[in-house]
Image (cartoon, rainbow, N blue to C red):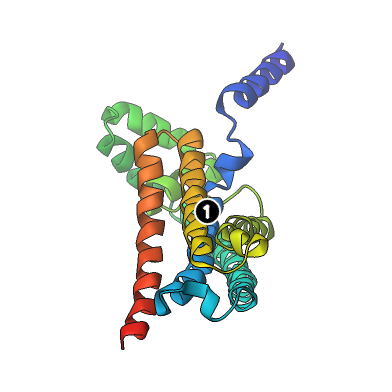
Amino acid sequence: MTHDFAAALARHQDDEHKVGRVQEFLKQIVYGGNDGIVTTFSVVAGFAGYKAEGAATVGGIAVLLFGLANLFADGTAMGLGEYLSSVSEGDVYRGARERELGEIRDDPRSETAEAVEIMSGRGLPPEDAHAIAEIMVRNPQFMADFMMQYEIGVADPGGNGAVVRGLVTFMSFVVFGLAPLVPYFLLEPVPATFRLSVAATFSALIALGLLRWRVTTQGLGRSVGETVLVGGTCAAVAYAVGWAFRVA
């Protein structure tokens, strides 16, 4: 009977509450994708802003060379940065949790009082808070998880490892970052090509916004609008820098 209940509970969690892969890595996908789009478009926009005739002045090969160099160099840096950040986050969590376990072992009375205060502050009646705290202190691992969440405010990074997060960031950076360069792979570097690059850039930003909308509770307008606004602002700054050098 207990086995059947555990199996049913596991199925329910998988069906109703399991976080999908895209949701699990949404931070890395959005962060890497947005930076990839802006990084490569900044190269194109800088050339286009510098001369009225755009990238035709320096040639499509130069645009692709600088664009791809920035794409893969910055993508690698982003991926490694995410890896190091994830490793550091995990180290901080584990160190703090070990200290919390030590406090529960060495001074259970104080930890029980802290747990009661936390639960009372969140609306539990004092008698219930005391009863729950007494149970938790006899289960140090569970109590440590509770205190990490509600006393220290550090969430368990858990899930997939730092290597996977770094790879997801890198892949998202490269895949979305290719969008502004696609027209220069296919066409001569004329002014119309730059306009197509602008269209490809905003299409990639919209796609990223739609992805946010699909896997979060945010509204469609907010998800797409925020993504396009942030990316578009960065793109405008890149164009303005190139234009400033042209008029200087």
Q: Where is residue 242 in the image (x, y as percent from the top left)?
A: 39, 78
In depth, the one of 23 and 226 nearer the eye is 226
**Relative height, residue 196 to residue 143 (above, below):** below
Could you say whether the residue bearing mark 1 is in a helix, strand or loop? helix
Residue 62 lies in quadrant: bottom right
Residue 50 lies in quadrant: bottom left
Query: Is residue 110 in view from this perspective?
Result: no
Q: Position of residue 73 (x, y in %)?
A: 62, 75
In depth, the one of 230 and 240 nearer the eye is 240
Q: Which amino acid type is shown beneath numbered disc 1? A: Ala
| Quarter of the image with the C terminus in it | bottom left
Mark 1 Cα-neighbour bin, 10 Å: few <14, some 14–19, many ≥20: many
Q: Which residue is drawn at 50% across and 61% down?
A: 192
In depth, the one of 59 and 81 nearer the eye is 59
| Quarter of the image with the N terminus in it | top right
Q: Indicate left or right for 62 with 89 as reference.
A: right
**Relative height, residue 48 to residue 174 (above, below):** below
- Name, please, the residue furthest toward the bottom: 248
Q: Position of residue 79 (x, y in %)?
A: 61, 65
Label 1 sits on residue: 200
Q: Residue at x 40, y 72 (%)?
A: 238
Q: Position of residue 222 (x, y in %)?
A: 34, 40
Residue 124 lies in quadrant: top left
Q: Residue at x 34, y 32 (%)?
A: 129
Q: Indicate left or right for 108 with 8 as reference.
A: left
- Name, please, the residue furthest toward the top: 1
In depth, the one of 159 and 125 nearer the eye is 159
